[in-house]
Image (tube, rainbow, N blue to C red):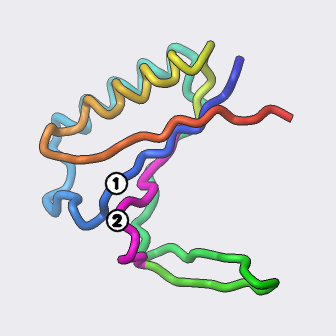
Amino acid sequence: MPRFLTMIRIDEQKLPTEGFPPEFEQRMGALLEEITKAGVMLDTAGLLPTADGTRVTWSGGKIGYTDGPFTETKEVVGGYSLIQCKDKAEALEWARRFLEIHPPEWTLGAEVREIAEM
């Protein structure tokens, strides 16, 4: 079965300062339990803010390092999941369900990419 990487894209500047509401954490826990029991979830995690990250670039034959935060970037990857599904349609369905459990006033997106098996 194919594996898919889902990258959750967020705007760090628009994250709620009050944190996650308790009902959100309950919905997230229920969805993660369901996707794990279905044998789909291989790995998932949220990422620390870009202020704690470093970008490494290769340009002109040289390595460069840029410490976060990356204020010039509107959207960043805030989390990911690695899932194994029968097809892309199933992977997109899980991504849709993940996004829908978030509060309606939040803005986030998901990029779903199939992993090339070598």
Q: Which mark lies nearer to you, 1 or 2?
A: 2
Which quadrant of the view contains residue 116? Answer: top right
Is 82 positioned to the left or the right of 60 in the image? left
Q: Which residue lies furthest to the right in this view?
A: 118
Is residue 20 shown left or right of residue 61?
left
Picture disc at residue 116: none
Residue ranking furthest to the front: 60
Q: Quadrant of the C terminus?
A: top right
Quarter of the figure with residue 32: top left
Q: Where is residue 53 in the image (x, y as percent from the top left)?
A: 51, 73
Tag 2: Cα neighbours inside 10 Å, few (<14), some, or many (≥20)?
A: few
Look at 42% across and 46% down and name the residue there: 8
Number of residues whose C-alpha sits closer than 10 Å to that of mark 1, classed few (under 14), some (14–19) or many (20 or more): some
User: Mark 2 highlights which residue?
Assistant: 74
What span is colored magenta in the figure? 69-81
Amino acid marked by disc 2: Lys
Q: Where is residue 10 in the image (x, y as percent from the top left)?
A: 34, 54
Residue 20: x and y in percent read 21, 49
Q: Which residue is drawn at 19% across and 55% down?
A: 19
Task: Calculate the distance from the C-alpha at mark 1 to the C-alpha at mark 2.
Answer: 8 Å
Q: How many marks?
A: 2
Q: Which badge, 1 or 2, comes first in the chain's sequence?
A: 1
Indicate the quadrant containing the N terminus: top left, top right, bottom left or bottom right. Answer: top right
Task: State yes or no: residue 60 in magenta.
Answer: no
Q: Is residue 73 within the magenta segment? A: yes
Q: Residue 10 carries which label?
A: 1
The residue at 52%/38% (across/down) is: 6
Q: Is mark 2 on a helix, strand or loop?
A: loop
